[in-house]
Amino acid sequence: MLLLRTLLLSLFFSLPAHASTLAEELSVFKLSTSVKILLLKYYHVQADEGNPQLVEEVLRHREEVSLQKSLLLEDLGANFPARTQGIQTHWDEFNSLLDENIAEIRESNYPELQVVTLMRKAQRAMLQELELLSDQILAENELTLSELTVWQRQQKNLLLEVVERYIERAASSMGAPLTIDNVDIRVLCQQFERGIADMKSRVTASEAQRQLSKIHSQWLFIETAATDTNARLVPFLVMRYADGILGRLDDVAHHI
């Protein structure tokens, strides 16, 4: 009887602890997503030759990201000091370079390409630290993410990567992406498409099906724009549809 009571008490107290840990890890992923979107918003400014309204939108989003980052470091800094210090260092570098690029755009409508490259490099370094922090939180607490959560995050990351490559092309005066690697944007698009189709074949809830259909219709526009290098560049619509898809990916998870 005593053993049973001990096991029940252990389960009772461990569940809230696990929930708290997962909430902390979720905040890490949310920050990484916000940092990715911040760079996209900057590229949109560059693509629209310094549109003042878009500049203000970037600055507003930066304030939101900065707050997210501060809360995260406050919560996790004591337990992960080296990792959180790295996040802060890369954020400071990214932030400083973003200010420099915004100033250049306000003055001449065109930033210094080398500074843009350095800013993107600082962003990538911060994202890597966030990914390592997420892995460390899960490993130290012997936790794994649900299949649905993994799917949702994969789809978000694929979407943002496709949009980044597209918006880079729109932002480049040479009409070519700034990222040079061996990844074919068409392959990324196929992976996203398969992810939506797979989930659509598995869910039965009508609202989830409805959200997936909306995601697919908006995705088709983004895919066409991203893969047709001869098509007219429409960064405003691509950014708008991407924002809608991100929200609907959350809605799908809520209705399954």
Image (spheres, rainbow, N blue to C red):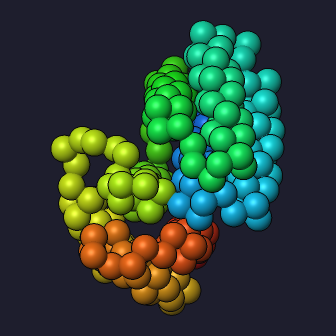
Q: Relative to the observer, which residue lies in front, 77 or 205?
A: 77
The image position of residue 245, as x and y in percent, is: 53, 72
Q: Give the residue displayed 72% in from the left and 40% down from the top.
A: 103
The image position of residue 147, as x and y in percent, is: 40, 54
179 sits left or right of 140 in the view: left
Q: Relative to the observer, which residue lies in front, 84 or 90?
A: 90
Q: Relative to the observer, which residue lies in front, 248 or 228?
A: 228
Q: Where the N terminus falls, by quadrant?
A: top right
The image position of residue 116, as x and y in percent, is: 51, 37
Q: Give the residue displayed 21% in from the left and 60% down from the top.
A: 187
- The reply to whether residue 40 is visible in this rendering is no
Compared with residue 75, is residue 250 higher up or lower down, i.e. above or below? Answer: below
What is the residue that sits farthest to the top in this orientation?
82
Tell me which corner region of the image, top left, top right, bottom left or bottom right, holds residue 89: top right
- The reply to whether residue 149 is visible in this rendering is yes
Compared with residue 71, is residue 147 higher up or lower down, i.e. above or below? Answer: below
The image position of residue 138, as x and y in percent, is: 50, 30
Tell me which corner region of the image, top left, top right, bottom left or bottom right, holds residue 246: bottom right
Q: Relative to the observer, which residue lies in front, 21 or 95?
A: 95
Q: Give the residue displayed 22% in from the left and 48% down from the top.
A: 183
182 sits left or right of 51 in the view: left
226 sits left or right of 235 in the view: left
